[in-house]
Amino acid sequence: MEIAEFVKTQRKKLHWTQKDLAFYGGVGLRFIRELEQGKTSLRMDKVNQILGLFSAELTAGPIDRSIYA
């Protein structure tokens, strides 16, 4: 699941608006909008700040290169 889809799904499960998520996550509303739209150049620390509300986080891992074969 994409991060954008995950965040939006989790937010809706809690019946939160984007404004609510921004408030509880300590970030701006614009950041939440960009996150849920799948912007690829967001600050990882802020993304983890939001993911932490849902007991999740971004981590480094190996790249699955088989998708390129």
Image (cartoon, rainbow, N blue to C red):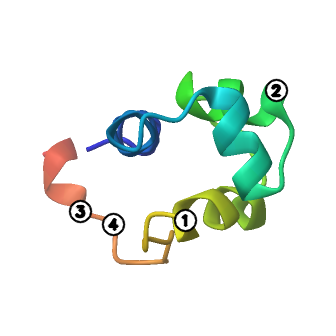
For residue 64, which numbered disc appears in the image? 3
- Sequence-first disc among 3 and 1: 1
Q: Earlier in the sequence, mark 2 or mark 3?
A: 2
State which tag comes first along the sequence, 4 or 1: 1
Q: CA distance from mark 3 to mark 1?
A: 28 Å
Seen as rendered, the residue at the extreme front is 15
- Is mark 3 in CB contact (under 8 Å) with mark 4? yes
Cα distance in 3D space between marks 2 and 3: 32 Å
Circle 4 SS class: loop
Q: CA distance from mark 2 to mark 4?
A: 30 Å
62 or 2, which lies in front?
Answer: 2
Q: Is 36 drawn above or below residue 24 in the view shown?
A: above
Query: Looking at numbered disc 3 in the image, what kind of residue is underneath it?
Result: Asp
Residue 13 at what x, y percent from top left? 32, 40
Residue 3: x and y in percent read 43, 45
Q: CA distance from mark 1 to mark 2?
A: 18 Å
Q: Amino acid at mark 4?
A: Ile
What residue sits 78% from the left and 35% below the top?
31
The amino acid at mark 2 is Arg
Q: Kindly identify which numbered label has been placed on residue 53.
A: 1
Tag of residue 30: 2
| Quarter in which the N terminus is drawn | top left
Q: Which mark is residue 63?
A: 4
* Amino acid type for the residue under numbered disc 1: Leu
Please state if 66 lies on the left or on the right of 47 as rendered. left
Which one is closest to the eye, mark 4 or mark 1?
1
